[in-house]
Image: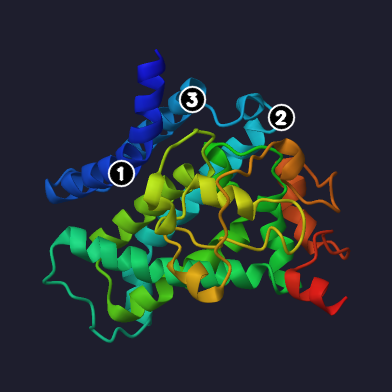
Amino acid sequence: MPILRELVKVSYVPLMLVGFLAAGLIAIVSGFGYGSLPVLLLLAVGVSFAAEQLVPYEEDWNLKHNDSRRDFIHAVVNEAVNACSVALLPLIVAFVPSFGLWPAEWPLWGQLLLAILIADCGITLVHYASHIFPVLWRFHAVHHSVKRMYGFNGLMKHPLHQIIETLGGTFPLILMGIPLDVAALLAFAVAIQLLLQHSNVDVKIGPLRYFLALSPLHRFHHIKWPVEGDVNFGLFTTIWDQLLGTAVYDAERRFCSDNIGIAKEPDYPNAYFTQLIQPFREQLTSKEPASKQAEE
């Protein structure tokens, strides 16, 4: 059993990131259609949850915190939004001019890698802005209200903020003329990465921490105190955090439920529909953006 645990710690990230993306690529190339991607995603969720039980980073995060039903609804709604975005791509392309810059002659895996890098930049910048501008923070606060980190946390977002992030990541791709196959695979890759980034798996990633925005780095982003938690905004990579000066990592730092959430709003609404209307209330959520803290 100890050998199995160590194997899971080392192999979890490659299996999820490389294994499932390769499976998605093969499914599309082999003509299995877009319907194969949700099936693969459900399998990935199962693998993620199994790994969390076998080698948890924090035992307490495997326990329900009166949040399972809410997180499930968030995941279903946000994945449905992603699916609709992909389905509407032909209609969007019909109204948005394309500059025809997409390298359609590249192999599909190369096109997917390019899409990931471009989308990562846009999503990271929207994420960064969401910690600076109060209007965006109100919607992003839903994601930061979590009291534990496990796979479904990545899909726990206010739908409007999800749409804003998606637009930030995909609009440049649409202008370049991204094909539907690549867009569908990109949506799949984002879902897999969100599972990885928030998973409660005690992974060993070695030097990958310098390049990939995985859970050991993303836990720093969920620190509940302003400014200290305004770090590691990247979705896929650390490239943009390195350029923004917001990349942080400390191998000795450990996290528990007391370290994450929103410090000034410990009683942030927990129910799904209450979270949907919370950003529209007049009172700002308690964790003020870093820029606001600096003013004080």
Q: Nearer the viewer, mark 3 or mark 2?
A: 3
Residue 144 disc label: none
Residue 154 at what x, y percent from top left? 54, 47
Three-letter amino acid code of the residue under disc 2: His
User: Would residue 197 be visible to someone looking at this image?
Assistant: yes
Q: Position of residue 158 (x, y in %)?
A: 64, 55
| Earlier-in-chain disc, 3 versus 2 | 3
Residue on which disc 2 sits: 65
The crowding category of the residue bearing disc 1, from other C-alpha atoms within 10 Å (few below 14, some 14 to 19, many at least 20), is many
Q: Please tell me which of labels 1 and 3 falls first in the chain.
A: 1
Which amino acid, mark 3? Val
Q: Which is closer to the viewer, label 1 or label 2?
A: 2
The answer to whether marks 3 and 2 mark residues whose Cβ atoms lie closer than 8 Å is: no
Task: Give the alpha-carbon distance from disc 3 to disc 2, as whole Å.
Answer: 19 Å
State whether residue 16 is above or below residue 181: above
What residue does disc 1 label?
Answer: 37
Of 277 and 230, the residue lying toward us: 230
Q: Which quarter of the rendering shows the N terminus?
A: top left
Task: Check the image and report above or below for 69 versus 189.
Answer: above
SS for tag 2? loop
